[in-house]
Image: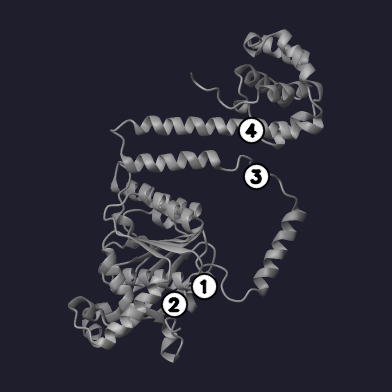
Amino acid sequence: MPRELPNSQNLESAVLGALMVFPNVMADCQDLDLTAEEFYLPAHQRLFECMTEIQESSMPIDQMTVISRLKDKQQLDSAGGTDYILGLADAAISPAMVHSYIEEIKNKAQLRRLIYTADQIASRSYQESEDIDTLLDEAERSIMEVTRNRRGSEFESSREISIRVIEQLNELRNHRGVTGIKTGYSALDTITNGFQRGDMIILAARPAMGKSALALNFVNQVAKRNDGCVALFSLEMPADSLMKRLMSCESRIQSDKLRNGKLSDADMSKLNEAASRLSERMIFIDDTSSIRVSQIFSKCRKLKSEYGTLSLVVIDYLQLITGTRADSRQQEVSDISRNLKILAKEMNCPVIALSQLSRRVEERQDHEPQLSDLRESGSIEQDADIVMFLYRKNYYDKEKEEQEETEVIDLTLAKHRNGSIGRIQLAFEKNISRFTNYAAVTGDDIYAG
């Protein structure tokens, strides 16, 4: 025998009766965002809809007005009939109790939505034709939709807002250091005030410019300097190779040695120390080669649920993500870009997505990237809060590239939605894939300590 869904019919009758006896009760209903769909009985839904219409037409809500309007709409019988509506007045409660009654009605409605959603998930789970990753993502989304805050935003007075803003400004004034996610790169943190939570950041460059290496440095430094975990989705490189790069960078042992195994006892000692430091940082790597956006959402939600907060999500790189079917690749990339911005807001952390640039960069004499070079979709620029370009001048001068083990790299902020744009310089040690502040030559080494 099927169980009755959670409901509060008596409370619904009491609130509807109060609405016809104490018309000001409608203000409480509106304040708590009570809707007709949240009533359990269809008759009560029609009654509340009718009362809402009367309120919107600036007429008084009373029994006779409600009965008359329902007659005009030929809905009197489906709303319980005249005797039922007149009897609701006997169930009316004091306006002082209405608030708690409405809250209970809404709670029961939310339980019903949760049961309905769970049934939908169960029903779809029996259909074996469904793609499992899509199903899991939609299940998570639908459950989250039920659990979201039911009440919408309300008006705030200018006095309340101004007091809050002044408090924030005083806090900023007295705060030392950056307010966002610290990257350790002082010039970058100065411009951005740290990567801000909810921002989508594009790091773009032509191949061989070092964007994957810089992204890995961001992962390491953010995990080192901030609370919360860091997620790295690598669609090109396996997790073991990434860890070798991190260990090379952290220990300053040349990456070639980690590939060919020509390591001394001293090298192994340094690598063990580096591995110990890295193991203490909450860095999580996923090297699924053809990951979908839905899988990225799912895995990030799981990390956030287990560890409380995310400091950074890095995706290497955007164009390799498997998107939903679209009319064109450009539309597909646009959808992926838009979803990554949603991911940043939902996870409340910065999301760095690496992106390729078009070949037009190579055709220009100076080879310096521009926003128009972002490959496959103009929406990448539109969705991003920050667009950064990496440029190695020495790459186009082969003689210099071969001679210099450490070179100066330009990192250009070409777009910064909430701040200034500009160019900073980083020192790049190619043989250990290590980026440091250009001032490191004078002792400002972010890897020290």
**116 relative position to 320: left or right:** right
Q: Which residue is mark 2?
A: 424
Residue at point 74% right, 34% down?
99
Label 2: how many Cα within 10 Å (few below 14, some 14–19, many 20+): some
The residues bearing labels 4 and 1 have C-alpha atoms spaced at a distance of 46 Å
Sequence-first disc among 3 and 1: 3
Going from N to C along the chain, the mark reached first, 4 or 1, is: 4
Is the image coloured rainbow, by chain, by secondary structure, or in one colour? one colour
Give the CA distance from mark 3 to mark 2: 40 Å
Lateral position of residue 228 relative to residue 402, left or right: right
- Look at discs 3 and 2 and give the one toward the viewer: 3
139 w.r.t. 81: above or below:
below
Circle number at residue 153: 3
Q: Is residue 59 visible?
A: no
Report the residue that reaches farthest toward the front.
1
| Residue indicated by mark 4 | 106
Dot 1 or dot 2, earlier in sequence: 1
Element class at badge 4: helix
For badge 1, the amino acid type reads: Ile
Q: Secondary structure at mark 1?
A: helix
Q: Name the residue located 37 percent from the left edge and 68 percent from the top edge.
A: 215
Q: Secondary structure at mark 3?
A: loop
Amino acid at dot 4:
Lys
